[in-house]
Amino acid sequence: MSSFPIARLRRFRRSEGLRGLVRETRLTLDDFVMPLFVGPSPIPNPDLPGLARHSVETVGDEVDDLVRLGVGAVILFGIPEEKDEDGSGAWDDDGVIQRALRVLRERQPQLVLLTDVCLCEYTSHGHCGVLADGEVDNDETVSLLARTAVSHVEAGADAVAPSDMMDGRVAAIREALDDNDFETTPIIAYSAKYASAFYGPFREAAESTPAFGDRRGYQMDPANVREALRECELDVDEGADMLMVKPALPCLDVIRAVRDEFDLPLAAYNVSGEYAMIKAAAARGLLDERQAALESLTAIKRAGADVVVSYWTKELAAWL
Ligand code: PBG
């Protein structure tokens, strides 16, 4: 390999045309998923437009907008009218997500409809599963998640994404889907989901802050990466069709490690706190939002993610 003065890496940086020719990572809207919150009534969020809440009545207009802009996939989160100990709104055939899915399936037949499968938005205590002796009971929760996943697919979901971090949930969901003749429906497993401080704005929007304690008894310790690979390996064995790492920016090394180890499609979740930090800094004039967002999303792709779930998806559609 030649070195300076023969090698001058600045030669390809001299113009946008030359830079474009050698660019290694590109953003295309095809890889992006827009999260949508659906609750009893719409709640706009001017500071964080991606975290606005829609209702079953208004979400159709939002989705028409997204499709017009070229967005190809959304992931739905539901906030029920009433919460209870078991989170029974999650699998209610007439629940908020099930009704939204029926509306959207009909309105935009081509749009990919993903659903987040978890109980935290539906439980009165805000934990991701049912409680026994003050702890989240794994196996009891898993059967409720499977029931929830089936009800989402019955209502029109194209794929389900369990985000609860219970052990064995992918296998249970696979079995339940197959038993209901949904063997062609994929499971996107939030395999390596960390107990992260970056979920704050989401929990505000989804009203899912735990009433006591935290999620460290089921979500992963941010200090671990080998454990993330074990989580992925188990999910692959249990029948996951796509893996996910979450959050994204604090976990670029995890995304890379999973990409190198597994051949399944890989998603990364650019979470609410990652979005809110840049929005807040931009609002104070500390940085340029568009450039910071594009740099972040490019970094997530460069680390190895095929699919990116991001609150910037709608804005990105306008930028690209
Ligand atoms: C549900 C769920 C959460 C997020 C996605 N699914 C919250 C949590 O685990 O507390 C967070 C997404 C975000 O912050 O954007 N369990």
Image (cartoon, rainbow, N blue to C red):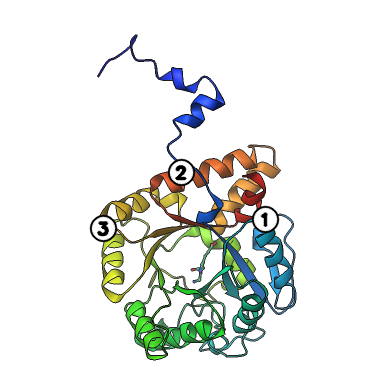
- At x 46% / y 49%, what residue is drawn? 249
- Foreground: 48 or 255? 255
Q: In the depicted view, which residue is nearer to us: 209 or 260?
A: 260
Q: Nearer the viewer, mark 1 or mark 3?
A: 1
Q: Which residue is disc 3 drawn over?
A: 226
Query: Could you say where residue 189 lies in the image, as x and y percent from the top left?
Result: 39, 69
Task: Give whichever of discs 3 and 2 has the lower sequence position.
Answer: 3
Q: Quadrant of residue 223?
A: bottom left
Quadrant into which the N terminus falls: top left
Q: Secondary structure at mark 2?
A: helix
Q: Is residue 31 visible?
A: yes
- The residue located at (26%, 55%) in the rendering is 261
Residue ID for mark 2: 299
In this view, the mark in front (2 or 1):
1
Q: Residues within 10 Å of mark 2 (few under 14, many from 20)?
A: some
Residue type pointed to by label 3:
Arg
Q: Residue at x 54, y 89 (%)?
A: 88
The three-letter amino acid code for the residue at tag 1 is Leu
Percent x, y for residue 304?
38, 49
Work out how far the residue at label 3 is from the one at label 2, CA to CA, in angstroms: 22 Å
- Viewer can see residue 192: no
The tag on residue 69 is 1
Of discs 3 and 2, which sits in the foreground? 2
Whole-percent x and y of residue 26? 49, 42
Q: Is residue 151 left or right of residue 38?
A: left
